[in-house]
Amino acid sequence: MPAPDNIYQNDVDFTTLALQYPDFAKRLKPNRQLDFSDPESVRQLTKCLLHRDFDLTVDLPEDRLCPPVPNRFNYILFIQRLLDSTSPSFHQGFDPDRQVIGLDIGTGASAIYPLLACRQRPQWRFLATEIDEKNREYAQRNILANALQSRIRLIDTDEKGDRLIPTDQLERFDRIDILITNPPFYPSTQSLDESARQKSRPPNSSCTGAAVEMITPGGEVGFVAKLVDESRRPANRSKIQWFSAMLGKLSSVGAVVERLREQRCGNFAVAEFVQGQRTRRWCVAWSWMGYRPANDVARSLGGGSGVEKKLLPAITEVEFEAAVRDAGVEGVLDMIASEIIQGLDGVRWKGDRARGVGMFMSRDGDVWSRKARRRKMAVGREPAAGRNRASHAKETGGGNKRDTDTDMKDDDDGTNSNLSSDDEPEPALVVRISITPSPSPSPSSSTTTTTGTAPTARIHMRHLQGPDPVLFESFCGWLKRKIVAAAMSSLP
């Protein structure tokens, strides 16, 4: 069974672990604490946690990195949430039937990320690369030891390190859902030694990593910048939905985000992993596709995070309250469909009245603003042939012949089809609109937009797909004004 998400919320109880594993008990000091400067003690801790919590057996070499389990597991939990909130089927939350293929760049001797991921999600599979021969041998051994060779495969890669993504090896796969990597921290041996001195301990006293695991030109920022550049190549950006990297320095987050913005990537997520009192790691994930993560995933930061607000991605959720008619939530949904959405060209709408959920899609972008209306009026003055084509597009939902009831779907309807077929361009905007009754009117609330004693509803808009966050904000502002105006006109 998958381990619970909060399994490492508290520090590991070494005494309890020692009762289960005699080899680990031998490493405890008289005060029942662990000497983290002793490499063998650290290896025993990793082995025992993997076995107890994930039923994984691993063999770790003495002269290679020994991964701490809790922060590696945090990375896996984050990519689970990231993929759960950006499914091409628009299913929100864990979909036990969704098959995921991941790619781990530099899997290490333990192959810990693929092992943890496949233990957590039975439908997940992983590809992994490794340029160090000894790491590769141990990784294959650990995959076989856990009978996961049918789900985890080591693939050949560029041993010179000229390319990080093995594009040629991925041709046989239709898609890769997530790329993960934990890059080397340091740009040189000198910087590694200096870091050790600043931590008031002898260099490498508890760090058994080989140079290939610890050092790379430009450090982790240089590594991830190269990965960003490779991700832009057409063969990679069209096949791999998400790219991600775990970072060991807070300063690296800003450098990576700036690199993404320089490359005009607006779909990214920033996460912080906190383990214990001092250990912090960060992750930046990005995508060239249009599926947008939920706010709490895209901005996965706890209180007291050192990540500057300016480095965070655009919001993907907007919420407000408005007075409702006597029909309640169903009436608001009907009003959106019949009085607001119906007048727009080239859009699709599917509503579920019972659940108070609607799905809005615009293939061509802004069709609701004043500028769009002026453009529509200009089209109306075109020759008759042009008007006929425009009319036909409206009747068929923008030219697509499929029925909207089968084409549009929401997170719980069990379908796995896309909004558009494979030969159609990605829609400019897809928004999920959820309407729930508010407990009571809240005139003093900052989210309340109407006054009086009429019952209110909470309208939540979630950006599901589309490359432009400004377009999403424009739609939300327009829809909010329309709903509030309609609500006010219905009040006595």
Image (cartoon, rainbow, N blue to C red):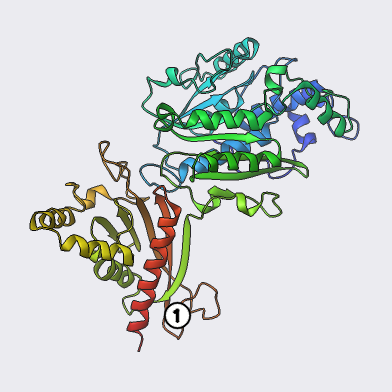
Q: Residue furthest left?
A: 384
Q: In this orientation, does residue 326 appear?
A: yes
For residue 200, which quarter of the picture?
A: top right
Q: Quadrant of the N terminus?
A: top right
Q: Residue at x 30, y 44 (%)?
A: 415
Q: Residue at x 47, y 40 (%)?
A: 83
Residue 279 screen position, x and y as percent: 75, 40
Q: In the rendered image, which residue does mark 1 sit on?
A: 450
SS at mark 1?
Answer: loop
Q: Residue at x 78, y 45 (%)?
A: 277
Q: Is residue 22 above or below residue 327?
A: above
For residue 240, which quarter of the picture?
A: top left
Q: Quadrant of the C terminus?
A: bottom left
Residue 268 screen position, x and y as percent: 52, 44
Q: Which residue is drawn at 71% across and 38% down?
A: 249
In depth, the one of 295 and 110 nearer the eye is: 295
Q: In this view, does 184 lie to the left or right of 420?
A: right
- Disc 1 marks a residue whose amino acid type is Thr
Q: In this view, does 492 lie to the left or right of 388?
A: right
Residue 179 screen position, x and y as percent: 51, 30
Residue 396 screen position, x and y as percent: 16, 52
Q: Is residue 200 above or below residue 335?
A: above
In depth, the one of 378 and 363 nearer the eye is: 378
Q: In this view, does 352 lie above or below 294?
A: below
